Amino acid sequence: MSDATLTGAVPGIPGASYRAASLPGALQNAIFINPWTQVADGKVLLHVPGVARYMMEGGVSISIHAEKDADPSSVDLFLKGPARGYLIHQRGEVPLEAATVIAPNGAAVALSSLSGMGNSTLAAELCRRGWRLVADGITRITFTAGRMLAWPSHDKVILWRSACESFGMDLKSLQQVRPGMEKYYVPMPAARGSAPLRTVVRLVRGETVARIETLAKGEILPSLQRWQYRWPQIEPLLAGNISPTIARMAEACQVVNITGAREKSPFELADIVTR
């Protein structure tokens, strides 16, 4: 891969950039937060074997050392996913694990779930109904000028082959996420700017009959904390401190659980969210 390929702006984070660089295999006096990620002196070093090493610094830069013969699509996938998520943490902002869309009334709705629960598929169906995509995978949330804002970073959602087929999409017209993975980038109508975040919808496994539950105020903060990117790994580094952004988010946003979501089609879930 050429250095010119690995140079650009980090999506959805004004002033943040990435570039190719030589990186060490380890940081001095590092704390390992998982077998592939270490932290020291305000830096995060992520190693994806067979792909690249990524160094996040100061919430504004990502340095990338791609491995020899690394697949470019894989390097890009981890840059715009995990590396970007750690960079948002460094900024004191919220990297919410969610696909976020803008409703016709202009308010942003974040769709969060455990992996494989279908939040990206639900976002795709809502966009097919006239909503607009803000982000997929990780949504950057800030408290700016007195408002909680969701920042646009994606114009595509990542869908499994089965989801694409359920929408009647021609797989030959779609870009595969990475070799050997049956996931595809699917273009969607995209937001042009940030949008006020009012609601977080959490898709939850459970009952076969969908049940909608609005969380009480006291339940919102711990729930939102858990739904940040890689929270179980990041939490020990914060020594119990609560991000001011996540605290304000808990005050400003409504959080709704849809239990039994796994048993519902994206079309049925889109009906529920729209109502």
Image (cartoon, rainbow, N blue to C red):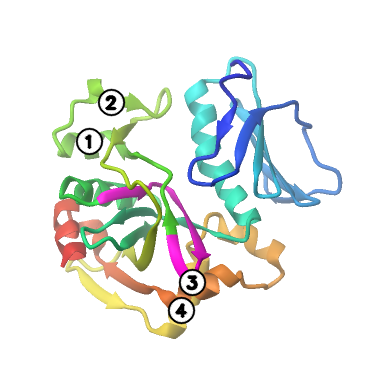
* Number of marks in picture: 4
Where is residue 267 shown, x and y percent of the image?
14, 52
Side of 216 where 77 appears, left or right? right
In the image, which disc is placed on residue 24?
none
Which amino acid type corresponds to the residue marked 1 in the rendered image? Cys
Q: Mark 4 points at which residue?
A: 251
In this picture, which residue range is highlighted in magenta?
132-149
The mark that comes first in sequence, 2 or 1, is 1
Which amino acid type corresponds to the residue marked 3 in the rendered image? Gly
Q: Mark 3 points at which residue?
A: 146
Question: For the point 67% across and 44% down, which residue is it?
Answer: 37
Where is residue 22 shown, x and y percent of the image?
75, 26
The mark that comes first in sequence, 3 or 1, is 3
User: In the rendered image, which quarter is residue 255 located in?
Assistant: bottom left
**Disc number lying in front (1 or 4):** 4
- Residues at discs 4 and 2 in contact (Cβ within 8 Å): no
Q: Is the magenta stretch mostly helix, strand or loop?
A: strand
- Residues at discs 2 and 3 in contact (Cβ within 8 Å): no
Mark 4–mark 3 Cα distance, whole angstroms, equals 12 Å
**Disc number lying in front (2 or 1):** 2
Side of 149 where 93 appears, left or right? right
Q: Mark 2 points at which residue?
A: 174
130 w.r.t. 221: above or below:
above
The mark that comes first in sequence, 4 or 2, is 2
